[in-house]
Image (tube, rainbow, N blue to C red):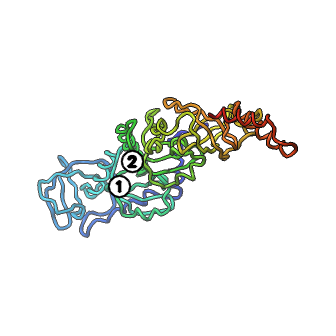
Amino acid sequence: MTRDPKEAIDAEIEAALDGIDLQSLNPSEEAPAAGGPAPHAKHGKSKDLHPGTVVGVTGPDVFVELGPRMQGVISVSEFETTPKVGETFQFALRGQDEGLWLLSRREALELAAWDEVEVGSLVKAKVTGVNTGGLELRVGPMAAFMPASQVALHRVEDLGAFLNQSFLCQVLEVARERKRIVLSRRAVLEHEREQTRADALDALTVGALVRGKVTRVEKFGAFVEISPGVEGLVHVSNLSRQRVDDPSEFVKTGQDVEAVVQEIKDGGKRIGLSMKALEPDPWDEVPDKYHEGTVFEGTVVRLMEFGAFVELEPGVDGLVHVSQLSRDRVARVRDAVNIGDTFPVRVLSVDVHGRRISLSRLDDHGATLGTEEAADAGAVREALRDTQAKPLGTNLGSLFKKALEGRG
């Protein structure tokens, strides 16, 4: 049964937060400045935001008009600069003391920030600490946490390297009652990677020349990353004009290569590449080089039921039919030849358009196997062996004559 992605993330968060008190990451409330209001609140704390106007500044205290018959006091230290009479701010109501509301700007800023944070939103956070489960961060005045699995696209061994760094994050969880915000940098990086991938695919066309790095080599070919998040496959048949039996002997992981885009399928999920397309095509010279009757040395590179494919040069193979592999009748091709065998062949026909060359194997005397010419040459050899037992006769002479006439 496939696990729901949200459940998986929730499990990661719970595991990362095991034993960690997020509220302890928030700064402790500062005691009022000397001469300020008492730290206790008769009616408890109120987390409501309330606008107020500064009506006076006396020493360390700032007096605020909150409304009709409603005044408050706050420490001047909670302002970046000493406020001026008439300026208006948002305040958090922390309770009352002797008829005055005890106010807080820090809590007001935090409450305002909480109102703007929601699951899925993007925030900028700064790393303030590291623990076994992940990173401690601050989003403005609020503390947040990021599980180790959400820090990067890949596993990070040293989380300390991120200390004091700031980066864009996505909000995974918001629990206001517990002052809990869980962030993910990985979600942002994944989105950026997908966007980069989409842009790269939009610009990619069949026939385009691309450069990339080999990321993986398999028996069937090599995977090449041509842009972040975009991979293509160079099939073994498209690695080179030369015959490639083992791709790992031709390319290595990490190697920089060039290739031509052959196909783009399934919205870019399948991209076919060819390195072979960048090499000169030896078939361009076949019409001028290979003619009927010409003889070449070839190497067996592939065996089929109907014959053997012989490489004449890298990228140019010809077929020797099973009937022309031996003087004797051949039931199985592998009984007559093996891969790697080298012997002379004669060109019987050339089909440039179909990229097919028909060949015949020659015997030790240059006769085409499986033909009358070869039979006559065989008879001559047989007669020569018989001369050890009896003198040459007219039959041998006629055989020589016939064999020579056949080559004329």
Give 106 or 211, whichever is nearer the viewer.
211
Above/below status of 222 relative to 309: below
Q: Are marks 1 and 2 in contact (CB under 8 Å)?
A: yes
Please indicate whether residue 200 sits to the left or right of residue 340 in the image: left
Give 392 or 85, whichever is nearer the viewer.
392
Please indicate whether residue 7 sits to the left or right of residue 48 in the image: right
Is residue 131 something one can see in this rendering?
Answer: yes
x, y percent for residue 65:
17, 52
Give 95 or 175, whichever is nearer the viewer.
175
Tell me the distance, in whole angstroms, between the alpha carbons under discs 1 and 2. 10 Å
Q: Residue 394's quadrant in the figure?
A: top right
x, y percent for residue 48:
30, 47
The quadrant of the image that shows the N terminus is top right
Residue drawn at (56%, 31%), measured in percent from left and top?
349
Residue drawn at (15%, 62%), measured in percent from left and top?
57
The tally of labels here is 2
x, y percent for residue 213:
45, 51
Q: Which residue is mark 2?
A: 188
Q: Amino acid at mark 1?
A: Phe
Q: Amino acid at mark 2?
A: Val
Q: Which mark is residue 136?
A: none
Secondary structure under tag 1 reads strand
Residue drawn at (33%, 53%), measured in percent from left and top?
124
Above/below status of 142 relative to 323: below
Q: Which residue is mark 1?
A: 167
The quadrant of the image that shows the C terminus is top right
Above/below status of 212 relative to 287: below
Secondary structure under tag 2 reads helix
